[in-house]
């Protein structure tokens, strides 16, 4: 009887763990700035299971940069320690000084995940548009792996269809599998069952995927691939999960 109980308990834990998607997170306080009064934004950087509100520690990232008008700016020195979902995280303040499309990108240190017996590195991106400019949102920034939006990644209504393309080493990933989760920051939603926590879509031969966003808020798209290079963990070579993560906001219209 004890063996049966232990087996069932382990099975439940296994299902719970597989239902939780890992997501690097870069969430700005706003996805658009319409005038100079809105120029200052705060970005929250974390690593979590966003729908379930379960956090994990995020070490100081390897790099944090903003790309605008073809130029990259290093923001690593602006990071301040923070607590997000009760775990170590980071925040930074950034002031947009000119019209443009600002692409913020975080490369974290490799995260060892014992449950999956591999390292995780999520190249995480979000896009903020400032002062009416919207040129260049579809441009890749050139990191190891990324999701290039084919739908404008700001100024979207809840219910819109979102389309993106998964790149690895600058090339499309045929049949890319993309996990999708809502940032359930206020705990307002509960998944009916574990299958509903993480949505999954598959890209076409060019790595292009589509997802219809059901309600307002921040939504994360994570395309996962295994690196050809392995990393050492306690003397053994382990796989590295490379994640291309994109966060974008969808809004409800203002009702009169």
Image (tube, rainbow, N blue to C red):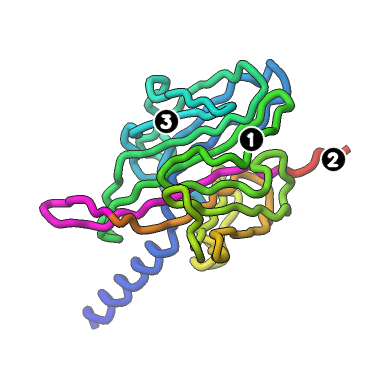
As drawn, the label of residue 255 is: 2
Q: Which residues are magenta?
A: 229-250
Number of other residues with Cα within 10 Å of mark 2, as a class: few under 14, some 14 to 19, many 20 or more: few
Residue 102 image point, x, y percent: 58, 29
249 within the magenta span: yes
Residue 243 image point, x, y percent: 42, 51
Question: Mark 1 — residue?
Answer: 136
Q: CA distance from mark 3 to mark 1?
A: 20 Å
> Which residue is at 53% across, 48% downward?
147
Of residues 133 and 193, the one nearer the viewer is 133
As drawn, the label of residue 236 is: none
Q: CA distance from mark 1 to mark 2?
A: 30 Å
Residue 78 image point, x, y percent: 42, 20
Q: Nearer the viewer, mark 2 or mark 3?
A: 3
> In the rendered structure, which disc, 1 or 2, sits on the residue that comes first in sequence?
1
> Which residue is at 84% across, 40% downward?
255
**Label 2 SS:** loop
> In the rendered structure, which disc, 3 or 1, sits on the residue that comes first in sequence?
3
> In the rendered structure, which disc, 2 or 3, sits on the residue that comes first in sequence?
3
> Which of the 4 quarters of the picture holds residue 38?
top right
As drawn, the label of residue 64 is: 3
Q: Nearer the viewer, mark 1 or mark 2?
A: 1
Q: Residue furthest right?
A: 256
Give the left or right position of residue 16, taking residue 118 as reference. Answer: right
Q: Main secondary structure of the magenta part?
A: strand
């Amino acid at each position: 009887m004890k063996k049966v109980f232990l087996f069932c308990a382990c099975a439940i834990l296994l299902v719970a763990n597989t239902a939780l998607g890992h997501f690097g997170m870069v969430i700005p306080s706003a996805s658009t700035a319409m005038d100079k009064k809105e120029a200052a934004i705060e970005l929250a950087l974390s690593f979590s299971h966003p729908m379930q509100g379960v956090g994990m520690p995020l070490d100081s990232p390897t790099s944090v940069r903003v790309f605008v008008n073809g130029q990259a700016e290093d923001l690593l020195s602006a990071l301040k320690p923070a607590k997000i979902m009760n775990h170590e995280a980071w925040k930074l303040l950034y002031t947009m000084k000119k019209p443009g499309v600002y692409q913020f990108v975080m490369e974290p240190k490799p995260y060892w995940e014992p449950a999956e017996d591999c390292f995780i590195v999520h190249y995480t991106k979000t896009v903020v548009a400032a002062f009416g400019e919207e040129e260049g949102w579809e441009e890749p920034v050139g990191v190891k792996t990324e999701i290039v939006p084919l739908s404008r990644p700001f100024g979207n209504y809840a219910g819109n269809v979102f389309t993106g393309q998964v790149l690895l080493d600058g090339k499309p990933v045929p049949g890319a599998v993309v996990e999708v989760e809502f940032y359930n920051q206020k705990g307002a939603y509960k998944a009916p069952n574990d299958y509903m926590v993480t949505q999954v879509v598959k890209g076409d031969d060019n790595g292009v995927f589509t997802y219809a966003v059901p309600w307002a808020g921040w939504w994360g798209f994570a395309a996962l691939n295994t690196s050809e290079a392995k990393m050492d963990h306690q003397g053994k070579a382990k796989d590295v999960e490379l994640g291309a993560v994109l966060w974008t906001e969808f809004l409800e219209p203002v009702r009169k």
